Structures are given as C-alpha cells and as structure tokens.
Image (tube, rainbow, N blue to C red):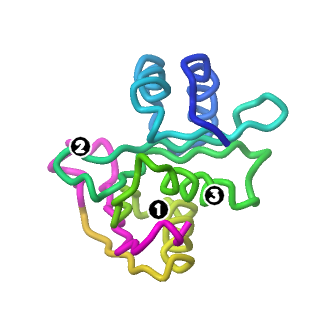
C-alpha cells in the first residue's frame, strides 16, 4: 500500500470502471486525486498491478472529519480485508492527526459498502449514524438513488487503526 502517483491515474480509472456501482470519475479527476490529494488517497499494488484504491479528503470546513469518497478493490483481491486495511492506513498517516470522525455516502442497496463501514465501526468500538445527505429527487433529479451518509465516531486515537 502506498500513496498514489500521477502515473497511477489510468490504472485507477480502469479499476473504478470494473467496480460497479461506483461512479466513474474523469481521468483528469483521478489524476488530481493522485497528485494534489495524494496524502488522502491510497493504492494497493500486487505484482505491479493496482488492485485497490481509496480516495478521500478532509473537508475544509470540518477538518476533524475524513470523508471517504471511493473504495475500489479488484475482484482478484477481494475477501482479504484490503479495503478496511487501506482506510486504516490512511487514517494512521500523520496528515490525518486530529480526525475524530470518518464519513462517507452510500446508497441503500450497496451491501458491500455498508458491511465495510459497519465492520470498521465495530472494530474501532465506534457508533455509526445514518442520515440522508444527497436525496434522489432534490439533488439528483431522480437520476440516482439517495446517498446516505454514514458517520463513524468518535475515533479517539490513532490506535483504532
């Protein structure tokens, strides 16, 4: 597991495309995440191939929160707790000192993501709050399911990782 670099952009785009229901980002967006946001993203490599990706950021208005934007794990690397280990590695970085809560958004039907984040909360001894963040009609004009925010915390120390 490591910080992404600019040359990871195409591999990350392919990985995301192979992991429905993730929304594909533009290649440019993925490049920006690999460069300008590299401290809040992580790739997992196996035999020279990118098999895992987590992107996130600390919202400027709420620096005590780490928002997980996307989690992608190739089919070849599933079942090894890779997604959880990548998130824990991100939170353990010095750049994320002071994070007290982890948030993400998930559609109701994404069972794998709910299992991941509820599992992390259990592992860390933290609670999970579920609230609607972006609603199907109001925010997506009916074209996308409601995105529910999962808020995990409080995260008391880096030892939760």
Highlighted range, magenta = 133-161
Per the image, the residue denoted by label 1 is 109
Instruction: Name the residue rendered at 64%, 35% in the picture.
Output: 18
Could you tell me if the residues under marks 2 and 3 are in contact, i.e. CB atoms within 8 Å? no
Q: Position of residue 123 (x, y in %)?
A: 56, 77
N-terminal of the pair, mark 1 or mark 2, is 1
- In the figure, residue 87 lies in which quadrant? bottom right
Instruction: Name the residue rendered at 63%, 58% in the picture.
Output: 85
Per the image, the residue denoted by label 2 is 140
Q: Which mark, by number, is residue 85?
A: 3
Q: Is residue 6 left or right of residue 103?
A: right
Q: CA distance from mark 1 to mark 2?
A: 17 Å
Q: Is residue 115 above or below residue 31?
A: below
Q: Is residue 78 left or right of residue 33?
A: right
Q: Position of residue 8 (x, y in %)?
A: 61, 23
Q: Is residue 27 above or below residue 53?
A: above
Q: Is residue 100 left or right of residue 85?
A: left
Q: CA distance from mark 1 to mark 3?
A: 23 Å
Quarter of the figure with the N terminus: top right
Does dot 2 land on a helix, a strand or a loop?
A: helix
């Amino acid at each position: 597991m490591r910080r992404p670099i600019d040359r990871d952009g195409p591999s990350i785009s392919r990985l995301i495309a192979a992991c429905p229901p993730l929304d594909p980002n533009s290649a440019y967006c993925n490049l920006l995440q690999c460069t300008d946001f590299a401290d809040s993203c992580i790739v997992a490599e196996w035999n020279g191939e990118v098999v895992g990706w987590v992107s996130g950021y600390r919202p400027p208005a709420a620096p005590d929160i780490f928002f997980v934007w996307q989690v992608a794990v190739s089919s070849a690397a599933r079942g090894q707790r890779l997604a959880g280990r990548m998130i824990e590695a991100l939170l353990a970085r010095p750049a994320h000192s002071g994070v007290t809560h982890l948030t993400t958004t998930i559609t109701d039907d994404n069972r794998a993501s709910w299992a991941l984040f509820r599992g992390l909360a259990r592992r860390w001894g933290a609670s999970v709050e579920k609230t609607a963040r972006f609603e199907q009609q109001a925010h997506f004009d009916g074209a996308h399911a409601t995105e529910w925010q999962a808020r995990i915390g409080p995260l008391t120390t880096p030892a939760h990782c």
